[in-house]
Amino acid sequence: MTDQQPVKRRRGCLFYGCLTSCILVLVVLAGLLLGYLKILNSFTDTKPTALPTVDMSDGDMQQVRQRVDSFRNDVRSAHPTQPLALTSNEINALIATDPNMKALKGKVYVVIEDNQVKGQVSVPTSDVGLAIFKHRYINGSGAFNISLTNGNLFLSLQSLAIKGRPIPEKYMQQVRAQNLAQGINDDPKSSAGLNKLKSIEVKDGKIIIVPTPPP
């Protein structure tokens, strides 16, 4: 009997096709990971940033609080009252000191320019619909949309730039859908007052809050 050498099997096209597919999948995954890391590092931070402080004396601050409290009490008691007009500086003072606006404290700084609400934000990514970037913060500047519908206050970011660069549109769509004022709506006392307001508008460098006329 003659010795027979084992026959080596040649790898066919199927083997090399599978190998090529695996390499392509790894390349795509690597690209997605690099893209994710680029967005993570370019548009988010590990910590919130300190927003500007309010430049207002204690006396002026007290006058603003008294004017707001008087308006709030009249609205809740269904007493006739004039609309409440607030400058951006007065709004920032209220955000910093008013318990009813604690949901915005340290997260929003308002500037009113050309009848448009602008400003700075420092919010967790989960607050603006970007929970995919866990334990990170959006620190930037943008333009807000503010409105009142059926007693619910809406404050949403319409445009947002981080480090001078706009957030990619696919993420901005999620950001626009988030209501930064939801915490105010969820507060029972604030909600009771909001239900008695007719409208909120931006005019002449101020935010004007119009009450519903008493019956």
Image (cartoon, rainbow, N blue to C red):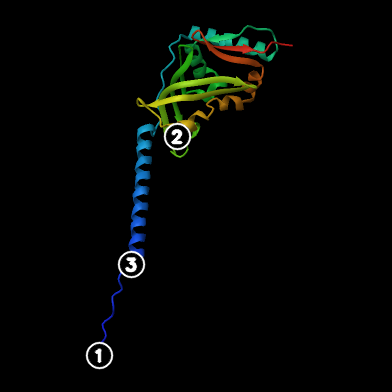
Mark closer to the chain start, 3 or 2? 3
Nearer to us of marks 2 and 1 is 1
162, above or below 90, in the image? below
Classify residue 144 as left or right of residue 139. right
**Amino acid found under the numbered disc labelled 1:** Thr
Marks 3 and 2 in Cβ contact (< 8 Å): no
What residue did someone put label 1 on? 2
Q: Around disc 2, counting alpha carbons within 10 Å, would you say few (fewer than 14), some (14 to 19), or many (20 or more)?
A: few
Q: Position of residue 14 (x, y in %)?
A: 36, 64
Alpha carbon separation for disc pair 3 and 2 = 43 Å
Quadrant assignment for the C terminus:
top right
Q: Which mark is residue 12?
A: 3
Q: Which residue is drawn at 57% across and 27% down?
A: 182
What residue did someone put label 2 on? 170
Does the image show residue 66?
no
Q: Position of residue 41 (x, y in %)?
A: 35, 35
Q: Residue at x 54, y 20 (%)?
A: 146
Q: Which residue lies furthest to the right in this view?
A: 215
Dot 1 falls on a residue whose secondary structure is loop
Choose between 91 and 212: the one closer to the eye.
Answer: 212
35, above or below 54, in the image? below
Residue 55 is drawn in which quadrant? top left
